[in-house]
Amino acid sequence: MKRSPAVITVFFSLLSIIFLGLAFTMVEAVRYRGARAHCADLTGVSNWSVFAEYENRLLEDFDLFGIDGSSGGGSLSVSGLETRLKAYLDENTDVTGNISGKLPGLTFDPFRVSAEKAEITEYALLSDQNGEYFYQQAVNFMHKTAWMNALGKLSESARTAQKAKKAQEDYEKAKENADRQLDQLKKGVAQKTAQAESSGQPSSDIVIIGDSAPDSSSQMYQDKKEAEKVKNPLWKMITLYFKKILPEVCGKGNWSKKKIPGSSLLSKRSRQKGNLKLDTGRGGVTDDLLFREYLLDHFPCRISGPSAAFRKNHPSAKTTQKTDYPLDYQLEYILSGTASDEKNLKKTVKKILLLRESYNYLYLQSDTASLGQTESLAALILGWTGNAGLIETFRELLVVYWAYGESLYDVRILMHGGKVPLVKTQGDWHISLEQLYDLEELLKGADTVPGRGESYSDYLRLLLNLQPVGTQKKRSLDLLEMDLRKSPDMENFRADSCVIGIKDTCSFQISPVFSRVTEVFLHTGLKAGNIKVDGGFAYE
């Protein structure tokens, strides 16, 4: 039998084609799997590149991260973000072109992928969730930078705020009762005036009169005339109570008159909203305290001058220097929420005044010497009525308005850079009962009193701790947006166009390499493949 070696050669040749095709297919499958990982890396790097274009002024002034999703135009443009993302994808996939030019010798690209499309499916904005994402970033910053041993002081500040709230509630009840008693005294004035006139005595200015009198109208009249020689501070204090508050505590015209259009505020207009839900792990009492410290550190008030962020970037600036803020009294805006520096300051002053009244009233009620003075003065002025109830009412009114007069003096000290302790001792008291009569003149002397204890900003901290943090999130975003609009090339900045996170889907095309061998020999019809990668990025 005769053998033919050529048959075996042909057989193994055909068989080798199959094995080679299988081998190249397996190599191509491995390359394809590697290309998927490569595309995931490209997507991640490109997302990082987009978010590396954060707004410098936002970081420098407020220690926050965000990118302008409007590219300076004002309105959010998702398509513009997609274009930026696609540009980075193209840059990073061009290995043999742009990248090899920057890295000489890198000319081999085993994956050969090209970016086809970048689609942003979800995005989150700085102003979303009523400022919750702004809050999260601010608190994260404070956790990383604040000294942890300061948390004990902040907790003490929170406890002080709760005590202050209770003191205010008690004082407001006493003040309401005093107002009712004052109305009764005014009615008594008319009654006793008529009684004095009917006794045949000449009428005159009657200081305070009750509902009953001694048996002898003539004796009552004489005693009343003697009582009128005693300086009565009550009517003086009541008159002062109804005067405009700012001139009394700041000095005539000594405050900012800046105003802004209220309709332009972020919290007042219709806002753009994102559709991406981010983790909100921060919250609770401690985080709220840190957020309020963030506000105190990044927004100026009437006394503090430039914010800490401005001083950090302008070391040579004096502490009293003002930047070109749309509103100068920004912490006062957070507390009061009007579009005018004057109105915000007025509301804030009234809140501090009420706080001081509460503590001053508690001090007077606990000080037997002070109560003795009010009893003596009340007896001198109204003893002629013979009405013990009326005398006691007058004494209580003296205590309330004495606390108010001392509080005016306290606030005047604070408004000129001095300090006033929250809880006073006898050595901290400034206005005597006799001095109430001339209080309006004495107030001017408070401008140079240094004092001790808490400063104006300390009282603002206390008021912030009494205010809901949700209100503070929205109002501080108003200020952030307004302040950044004063920066060059940021005139159209909007907090509700400031992107802080996205989710996206990036599409790639992978060109065949090893599968071409299989295509040539076996006609498998293998073409270029498509890869889709889900990616995203969010600032913490």
Image (cartoon, rainbow, N blue to C red):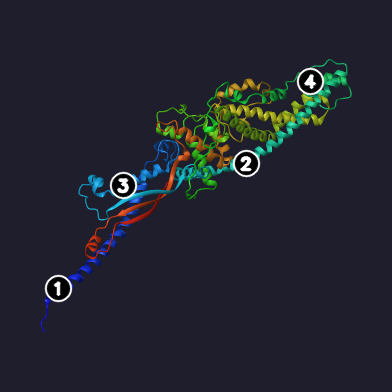
The reply to whether residue 160 is in sight is: yes
Residue designated by label 2: 163
Badge 2 vs badge 1, beta-carbon distance below 8 Å:
no
Which of the two discs, 2 and 3, labels the residue nearer the N terminus? 3
Q: Secondary structure at mark 4?
A: loop
Q: CA distance from mark 3 to mark 1?
A: 49 Å
**Which labelled disc corresponds to residue 9?**
1
Which of the two discs, 3 and 1, labels the residue nearer the N terminus? 1
Residue designated by label 3: 90
Q: What x and y, as percent, mark residue 376?
A: 75, 27
Quadrant of residue 345 within the rendered picture: top right
**For mark 4, does the 10 Å Cα neighbourhood hold few (<14), some (14 to 19), or many (20 or more) residues?**
some
- Amino acid carrying label 3: it is Asp
Q: Residue at x 31, y 60 (%)?
A: 33
Residue farthest to the left, as pictured: 2
- Amino acid carrying label 1: it is Thr
Which of the two discs, 3 and 4, labels the residue nearer the N terminus? 3
Quadrant of residue 21 within the rendered picture: bottom left
Q: Secondary structure at mark 1?
A: helix
Q: What x and y, as percent, mark residue 400?
A: 70, 31
Which of the two discs, 2 and 4, labels the residue nearer the N terminus? 2
Residue 134 in the figure: left or right of residue 100: right
Residue designated by label 4: 206
Q: CA distance from mark 2 to mark 3?
A: 61 Å
Badge 3 vs badge 1, beta-carbon distance below 8 Å:
no
Which of the two discs, 2 and 1, labels the residue nearer the N terminus? 1
Whether residue 125 is situated above or below residue 526 in the rendered picture:
above
- Amino acid carrying label 2: it is Lys
Q: What x and y, as percent, mark residue 511?
A: 27, 55
Q: CA distance from mark 3 to mark 4?
A: 91 Å
